[in-house]
Amino acid sequence: MKQVFFFAIAFVFAAFSCTSQTSHDGYTDLDVAAFKAKIAEPGIVLLDMRTPEETAQGMIEGAGQLDYEAPSFEAEVAKLDKSKTYLLYCRSGRRSGEACTYMAKQGFKNLYNLKGGYLAWTGKN
């Protein structure tokens, strides 16, 4: 009986540790595979939160740029349609996660962050 209990606990732990999504307050982190699948959905808006210097080194195809560190960031977010689905990424996922948190507080409902950022996307992490 103890073995069955141990294996059940191990299975549950493994199932949750291999998930491709992590929910936060107002947004969801997605791993690369889940992010790619989400990009393929119609009507999404893909945004790169990195600086122009960083995006000059490469971007995910189809992404627009919205520099999280720019003084105009909040004003640019205010121009966005809150009813759309947004997929955000940056270099490592930190800034885009912070951008998702900010956007959620502004009333955006469909927010996704690339876990590990562009480094994960390119396999350089």
Image (spheres, helix red, strand yellow):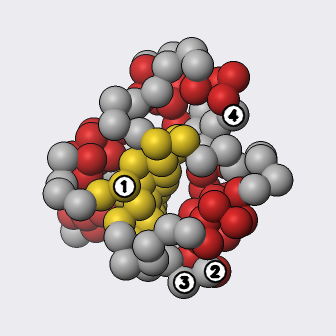
Type of amino acid under label 2: Lys
Residue at mark 4 to residue at mark 3: CA–CA distance: 24 Å
Can you tell which mark lies on residue 105? 2
Would you place residue 110 above or below residue 52 in this image?
Answer: below
Q: In terms of sequence position, does the residue under pointer 4 or pointer 3 come before the other?
A: 4
Q: Quadrant of the C terminus?
A: top right
Q: Which residue is mark 1?
A: 45
Residue at mark 1 to residue at mark 3: CA–CA distance: 16 Å
Q: In terms of sequence position, does the residue under pointer 1 or pointer 4 come before the other?
A: 1
Q: Is residue 90 visible?
A: yes
Asked if the residues shown at circle 2 and circle 3 are in contact, with their CB atoms under 8 angstroms apart, the answer is: yes
Q: Secondary structure at mark 1?
A: strand
Can you tell which mark lies on residue 51? 4
Report x, y in % for residue 103.
Answer: 59, 71
Q: Which residue is mark 3?
A: 107
Q: Picture quarter containing residue 10?
A: bottom left
Type of amino acid under label 4: Thr
- Using a 10 Å C-alpha cutoff, classify the residue at mark 1 as few (fewer than 14 neighbours), some (14 to 19) or many (20 or more): some
